């Protein structure tokens, strides 16, 4: 268990560092990459509800701290997304690229629409259609491809952690 917590915290720091530094500058086609959300989707596809929601909450909280607008909004949204994905992950063939990209696309759409509803519409910004077509949809499409290079390394990391946990908890 201590290995799992150590690796999870290390991954959290690496993802937050990458989101704050290189991905803040590198914006393909002017689109913001959401690495914490992509990692949250991968965690939701690989782990159970409790671990997924906790990691989603932590990744969302790191996103809230990096963006600095609202504290807790991304954390709650990422935890909900990870929890919902982890509830259906056992019933899916997770290795299919289409499944990974579809979950990432839907997750980005849900979180970005919710974020814009809370942040902009409550402030009187009324052009949601333009915002959806110009910002949310391209962000979702671009970020749905971000999950593809992340999935295999995460599978390897979690498989190794499972082996270490089984060796450590072996009776006899």
Image (spheres, rainbow, N blue to C red):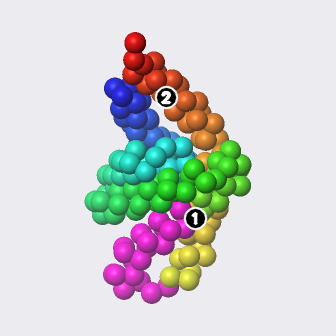
Tell me the residue at 30%/63% (across/down).
70
The answer to which of marks 1 and 2 sits earlier in the sequence is 1
Q: Which residues are magenta?
A: 106-127
Residue 160, image x and y in percent?
Answer: 53, 25
Q: CA distance from mark 1 to mark 2?
A: 29 Å
Picture quadrant of residue 149: top right
Residue that carries the numbered disc 1 in the rendered image: 106
Image position of 5 (left or right of 88): left
Image position of 157 (left or right of 141): left
Picture quadrant of residue 69: bottom left
Residue 142, image x and y in percent?
Answer: 63, 57
- The reply to whether residue 73 is visible in this rendering is yes
Helix, strand, or loop for circle 1?
helix
**Of 89 and 155, the residue lying toward us:** 89
Residue 136's disc number: none
- The reply to whether residue 23 is visible in this rendering is no
Tell me the residue at 61%/41% (across/down).
151
Tell me the residue at 53%/62% (across/down).
107
> Is residue 137 in the magenta section?
no
> Is residue 119 in the magenta section?
yes
């Amino acid at each position: 268990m201590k290995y799992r917590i150590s690796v999870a915290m290390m991954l959290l720091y690496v993802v937050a560092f990458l989101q704050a530094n290189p991905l803040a500058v590198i914006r393909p086609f002017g689109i913001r990459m959401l690495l914490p959300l992509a990692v949250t989707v991968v965690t939701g596809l690989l782990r159970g509800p409790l671990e997924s929601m906790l990691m989603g909450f932590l990744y969302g909280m790191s996103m809230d701290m990096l963006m600095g607008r609202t504290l807790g909004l991304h954390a709650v949204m990422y935890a909900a997304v990870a929890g919902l994905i982890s509830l259906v992950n056992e019933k899916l063939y997770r290795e299919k690229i289409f499944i990974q990209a579809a979950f990432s696309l839907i997750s980005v759409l849900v979180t970005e629409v919710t974020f814009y509803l809370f942040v902009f519409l409550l402030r009187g910004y009324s052009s949601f259609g333009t915002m959806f077509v110009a910002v949310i949809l391209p962000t979702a499409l671009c970020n749905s491809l971000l999950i593809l290079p992340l999935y295999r390394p995460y599978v390897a990391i979690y498989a190794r952690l499972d082996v270490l946990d089984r060796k450590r908890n072996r009776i006899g």
